[in-house]
Image (spheres, rainbow, N blue to C red):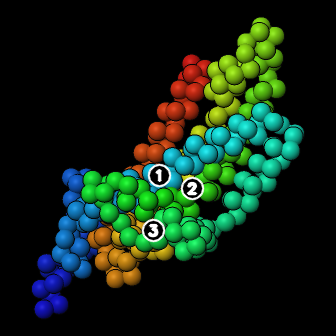
Amino acid sequence: MIAQIDAQYGLDQPFVVQYLQWIGGVLTGDLGTSWFNNTPVAELIGQRLAISSASIAGFALVIGVVFGTLLGLVAAVNQGRFVDRAVTAVASFMSTLPPFVVSIGLIVVLSIWLHLLPSAGYVPPQQDFWRWLSLITMPAIALSLDTVAELARQLRTGLVSTLQENYITGAVVRGLSRRRVLFGHALRNGAGPAVAILGMKIPTLLGGAVVTETIFSMPGFGMLSADSALRGDVPVVQGTLVVAIVLVLFCNVVVNVVLGSLRPASRRGR
């Protein structure tokens, strides 16, 4: 029976042959079959990826970009003032909070004390959009705090440096409004470090989803990879790693494209 199972999954072949067969399947979109439930790995990942990446991590990224940009702008415009110091202090504090601590705190406050949001579960958005939104809000907030903090600090540093450049002084002398100087000139040139940090935060969002999905009982991509590793379901573990790597590479390509569009002079220099 052992020999029959080995032959069924190709485990009786040399390691190199097994690897080449798996790579060939990956290149054609075939990630293999789960050893645990005999389901195609691509199908399992497709079901779970919509929960963690498209829902939790995607919403967390939106929260991080919106609030990180807002805090960075406020701090840079009020450089040296109380608001600047307060934003910097809050961002530093948020960056030290682990997602699981924030998750537990949100459950206690928003679910147990205030009864505003449900503490666990998941429903697809096409089934009940508002229920779906309420279920992913707390996990997304817990994941987004580190992104908010890093984006705010990097954007604040970049803008403060940019606002001291000679061409900004020239724009002010020519009579351009403060809003136009900030959003039309300074933000475009000072946002480079903040945009670059987003590419580094994508793996953090995907990795952090394992913890938040466990706390909020969401059967997402992170829980699939963790449970498969504990069960020894090698095809699923390999498939989740491949998909995670592809997502990270794709996000970094997007970040590089955005950076190139923000600084067209760098393209002309090449």
Q: Quickly name the residue at label 3.
A: 118
In percent of the image, x 79 and y 14: which residue is there?
172
* Relative image position of residue 49 (x, y in whole percent): 34, 59
- Chain-order first, disc 2 or disc 1: 1
Question: Which image quarter is the N terminus in?
Answer: bottom left
Tag 3–tag 1 contact (CB < 8 Å)? no
Q: What residue occupies the far bottom of the structure in this picture?
A: 1
Dot 2, crowdedness within 10 Å: few (<14), some or many (≥20)? many
Tag 2–tag 1 contact (CB < 8 Å)? yes
Q: Quickly name the residue at label 2.
A: 144
Residue 67: quarter of image: top right
Q: Which amino acid does label 1 sit on?
A: Phe
* Relative image position of residue 136 (x, y in whole percent): 44, 60
Q: Which amino acid does label 2 sit on?
A: Ser
Residue 51: quarter of image: bottom left
Q: Is residue 17 visible?
A: no
* Relative image position of residue 45 (x, y in whole percent): 30, 62
Disc 3 or disc 1, which is closer to the eye? 3
For the residue pair 87 and 8, the one nearer the viewer reads as: 87
Q: Is residue 81 left or right of residue 101?
A: right
Q: Which amino acid does label 3 sit on?
A: Pro
For the residue pair 140 and 116, the one nearer the viewer reads as: 116
In percent of the image, x 73 and y 12: which residue is there?
176
Q: Taking 187 as reference, is 173 above or below it? A: above
Q: Residue 213 carries which label?
A: none
Q: Distance between the residues labelled 2 and 3?
A: 19 Å
- Chain-order first, disc 2 or disc 3: 3
Q: Taking 259 as reference, is 198 above or below it? A: below
Q: In this view, does 83 lie to the left or right of 34?
A: right
Q: Quickly name the residue at label 1.
A: 59
- Chain-order first, disc 3 or disc 1: 1
The secondary element bearing badge 3 is classed as: loop
